[in-house]
Image: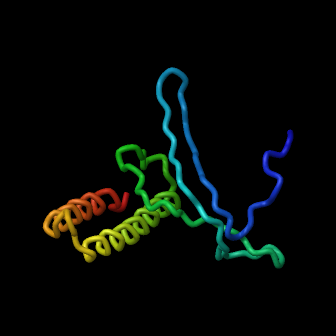
């Protein structure tokens, strides 16, 4: 089989992860996320070569209604919960920065209401599985 990639993944690379599932004639779903390659802390070492991992650059929670929790291992559930916690932390910080800048022509009251609605949605969307 011919190699698809000619260069190994290195720290600092930016790429997209797009796993999907399609049932012919029925439906399909794809999760698209942007990732950056970074050093990973692991329990074991492999010589002097460091292990690499990925950091999600797109802080978007996964839809709870589309997750069959019974199919996940405890480690997978913990990973989704940690992803949701990061999403909640990063997006909350951005929303609060937006609110602090004020509304300008839109108006501070409208911005505050939008931020409050967004925070309520975010809290529900990122609750632990």
Q: Is residue 54 above or below residue 24?
A: below
Q: Is residue 66 left or right of residue 73?
A: left
Residue 93: x %, y % from top left: 35, 73
Front residue (pair 119, 105):
105
Q: Where, quadrant-wise, is the C terminus in this rendering?
A: bottom left
Q: Which residue occupies the foreground of this view, 32 or 23?
A: 32
Residue farthest toward the front in the current orientation of the protein: 105
Tell me where residue 84 appears, x and y as whole percent.
Answer: 41, 62
Q: Nearer the viewer, residue 111 or 33?
A: 111
Please tell me in which quadrant of the rendered image residue 19 appears. top right
Image point 32% across, 56% down: which residue?
Answer: 125
Of residues 30 and 67, the one nearer the viewer is 30
Residue 113 horizontal side relative to residue 64, left or right = left
Which residue is found at the position 80% from the left and 73% from the top? 46
Quadrant of image for the N terminus:
top right
Q: Residue at x 63, y 57 (%)?
A: 15
């Amino acid at each position: 089989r011919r190699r698809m990639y000619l260069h190994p993944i290195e720290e600092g690379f930016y790429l997209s992860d797009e796993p999907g599932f399609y049932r012919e004639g029925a439906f399909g779903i794809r999760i698209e996320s942007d990732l950056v390659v970074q050093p990973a802390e692991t329990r074991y070492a492999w010589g002097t070569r460091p292990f690499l991992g990925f950091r999600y650059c797109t802080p978007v929670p996964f839809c709870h209604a589309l997750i069959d929790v019974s199919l996940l291992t405890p480690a997978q559930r913990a990973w989704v919960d940690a992803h949701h916690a990061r999403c909640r932390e990063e997006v909350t910080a951005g929303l609060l920065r937006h609110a602090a800048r004020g509304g300008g022509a839109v108006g501070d009251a409208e911005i505050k209401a939008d931020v409050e609605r967004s925070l309520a949605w975010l809290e529900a969307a990122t609750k632990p599985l």
